Amino acid sequence: MPVNFLLATALIAATVAIQAVFMEIGLRFIRRAEPGYLGRHATIATVVWISYLLIPISLDIYLWALLYYLIGALPSLDDAIYFSTATFTTVGYGDVVLGKEWRQISVFEAVNGWIIFGWATALIMAVIQRLYFRADGKANDV
């Protein structure tokens, strides 16, 4: 059980690092964009930003799936990706399950997904506010 806890903790740390790197790169680009340019194209910028944030989420899911596959918790990489996606998004269909010795790891993945999706939602809202509203709280002319 301590090994499972350590594996899960290491994966959470890795996914947080992945998310942080993508956040930093994305926000740096947004800050450096020509003033007003993104606001004039706010809808496109929003779609691009949300799509961009799906990249680290996908990497996180694949990282968890790779763990399940490499430790032999699931028989195929396809099953591992499917299970990881359902768990990370907290959908949890239950049609693919882990053996008793690995179940605790999936709980950590669900918590990890909850944290990452909350973080991504906050980033989405921060960028939307920047795109659509001026510093004085009034709407941009879009």
Image (cartoon, rainbow, N blue to C red):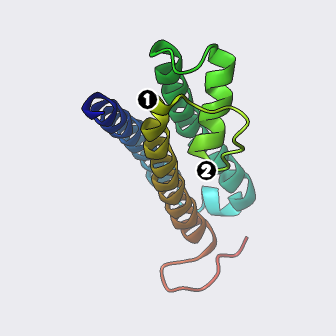
Q: Quadrant location of the N terminus?
A: top left
Q: Position of residue 10 (x, y in %)?
A: 31, 33
Position of 95 with respect to 89 (left or right) is: right
The residue lying toward the viewer, choosing from 103 and 139, is 103
The residue lying toward the viewer, choosing from 131 and 89, is 89
Estimate how packed mark 1 is, as few (under 14), some (14 to 19) or many (20 or more) residues with alpha carbons within 10 Å.
Answer: few
Give the number of the disc on residue 91. none
Q: Label 1 is placed on what type of residue?
A: Glu
Question: In the rendered image, which residue does mark 1 sit on?
Answer: 101
Question: Is disc 2 in contact with disc 1, using a CB cutoff of under 8 Å?
Answer: no
Position of 36 with respect to 64 (left or right) is: right
> In the current view of this chain or complex, which residue is farthest to the front?
100
Taking the spot 69% from the left edge, 41% from the top edge, the residue there is 94
Task: Report helix, strand or loop for mark 2.
Answer: loop
Taking the spot 49% from the left edge, 32% from the top edge, the residue there is 100
Question: In the rendered image, which residue does mark 2 sit on?
Answer: 90
Query: Residue 80's quadrant in the figure?
Result: top right
Q: Position of residue 15 (x, y in %)?
A: 41, 37
Taking the spot 63% from the left edge, 71% from the top edge, the residue there is 132
Q: Label 2 is placed on what type of residue?
A: Thr
Query: Residue 22's quadrant in the figure?
Result: top left
The numbered mark, 2 or 1, whose residue comes first in the sequence reads 2
Position of 39 with respect to 5 (left or right) is: right
Q: Position of residue 28 (x, y in %)?
A: 42, 47
